[in-house]
Image: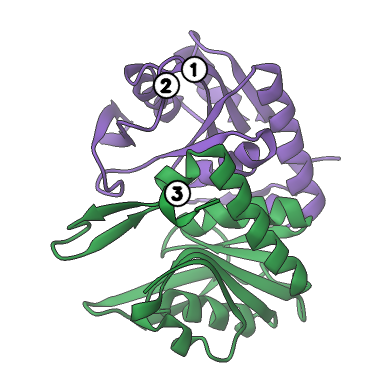
Chain colours: A purple, B green
C-alpha cells in the first residue's frame, strides 16, 4: 500500500518553517500499521536481531511490536531522569542546544545483536548516541530501522558505520 | 510464568519514600514480554476492541503490540505540545499540581470500541482523563488494560464506569 500517503504533513510544527511528518494518521490505519511493522520486522529478521532498543518516545511505538513479533526483549532509551536504576548517558549537540539520552547499565548483554528503532531519521544525532550507548554496554549494533527518513538531512552520513533501513524516504 | 518476579523494585524513585515498579526488567525478558502482550491481548479480544489508545509514554510500550496483534489502529494520547494537528485536552489534578493530556480530534471515529492502555494503574487520574477524551470524540471505552495495578491506591474506584483489567496487582 501507499504508506507515505498515510502520513500527514503539518506546516509550521513544532516551529515556523518546519513541515512536520505526522505518523498518527499512519498508526490509526490498521492496514498501514500492520504493513509498517511487518516490513520493519522483515528487515530486522535479515539482520539476526536479538534485542530491540527503542528511543523515547516514538521509538517505543515501533520498537515494541517489532520485539514482540521477533520474540526479542525490548530496551527503552530515555531522556534524563526517567530510568530508575543504574544507567549511563550520551549527549549530542542539536542545532540549538544539547540532548542527553540514558540507558540502564544492565540493559544489554555482552555481544548481543541489537536493533536501534526510531520513528524518524533526521540528522542522525539521536540514533548515533543510541548506538554509542549500546556499544559501551558491549552490544553489537546489528542495524538501525526507521519508519521515515528525511533524506535531505543526510542522517545516514552520521550512521555510516552501521546498517540503516528506512521504510519511507522523503527527499 | 512469574511475571511479577520480572519487575524490579527501585527504592526512593522518583522521590524519597516511593518504591518504583520498574518494568524494564520485564521488557528485556523475551518470554515475559510475549506473555504480557498475549494476556493483555486476550483481554482486549474479549472486549471486542476496535482501536487501541496508549498514554504517553509507557502506554505506547504496551499499546502498540496490542494494536498490532489485534489488527487495530493505534492512537497516542500525549502531553501538551506534542501532537501537531487539531486536538482537544483534559486536565486532572495530582497530589501536587495539574496534568494535561491531549488527543487529535480526528483520532477516534464515532461509536468505535476503544481500549485504553497504560503500563500502570495508580490513582487512575490519567486513565480517567483518557476515557473522557475518547468519549468526547464519540468513542466507546470498551475497557482499560494495565500491566501493573497498585491496588492500595484504589485507582479502580475512579474507573468504576469502565471495565478494568490488570495483569499484575501489588497490594
Measuring from the top left, give residue B41's x and y in whole percent: 69, 60
Chain identity of mark 2: A
Task: Tell me the quadrant of the picture where the C terminus of chain A can be found.
Answer: top right
Measuring from the top left, give residue A93's x and y in whole percent: 29, 28
Foreground: A69 or B60? A69
User: Which circle marks residue A86 in the picture?
Assistant: none
Mark 1 or mark 2: name the one nearer the start of the chain.
2
Q: Is there a contact, CB below 8 Å, between mark 1 and mark 2?
A: yes
User: Which circle marks residue A16 in the picture?
Assistant: 3
Can residue A77 be seen in the rendering of this structure?
Answer: yes
- How many numbered dots are placed on residues in this image? 3
Residue drawn at 60 percent across, 31 percent down: A146
User: Which circle marks residue A131 in the picture?
Assistant: 2
**Residue B155 position by quadrant:** bottom left
Gap in angstroms between the C-alphas marked 1 and 2: 6 Å
Mark 2 or mark 3: name the one nearer the start of the chain.
3
Query: Do discs 1 and 3 belong to a common subunit?
Result: yes
Chain identity of mark 1: A
- Whether residue B78 is situated above or below residue B150 in the rendered picture: above
Gap in angstroms between the C-alphas marked 2 and 3: 31 Å
Instruction: Name, please, the residue furthest toward the left.
Output: B16
Disc 2 secondary structure class: helix
User: Which circle marks residue A141 in the picture?
Assistant: 1
Amino acid at each position: 500500500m501507499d504508506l507515505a500517503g498515510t502520513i500527514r504533513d503539518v506546516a509550521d510544527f513544532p516551529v515556523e518553517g518546519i513541515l512536520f511528518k505526522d505518523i498518527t494518521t499512519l498508526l490509526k490505519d490498521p492496514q498501514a500499521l500492520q504493513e509498517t511493522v511487518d516490513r520493519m520486522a522483515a528487515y530486522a529478521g535479515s539482520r539476526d536481531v536479538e534485542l530491540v532498543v527503542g528511543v523515547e518516545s516514538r521509538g517505543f511505538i515501533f520498537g515494541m511490536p517489532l520485539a514482540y513479533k521477533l520474540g526479542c526483549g525490548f530496551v527503552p532509551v530515555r531522556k534524563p531522569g526517567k530510568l530508575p536504576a543504574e544507567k549511563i548517558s550520551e549527549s549530542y549537540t542539536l542545532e540549538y542546544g544539547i540532548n542527553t539520552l540514558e540507558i540502564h547499565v544492565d540493559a544489554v548483554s555482552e555481544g548481543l545483536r541489537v536493533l536501534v528503532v526510531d520513528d524518524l531519521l533526521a540528522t542522525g544525532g539521536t540514533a548515533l548516541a543510541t548506538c554509542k550507548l549500546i556499544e559501551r554496554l558491549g552490544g553489537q549494533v546489528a542495524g538501525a530501522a526507521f519508519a521515515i527518513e528525511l533524506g535531505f538531512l543526510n542522517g545516514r552520513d552520521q550512521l555510516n558505520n552501521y546498517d540503516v533501513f528506512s521504510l519511507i524516504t522523503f527527499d
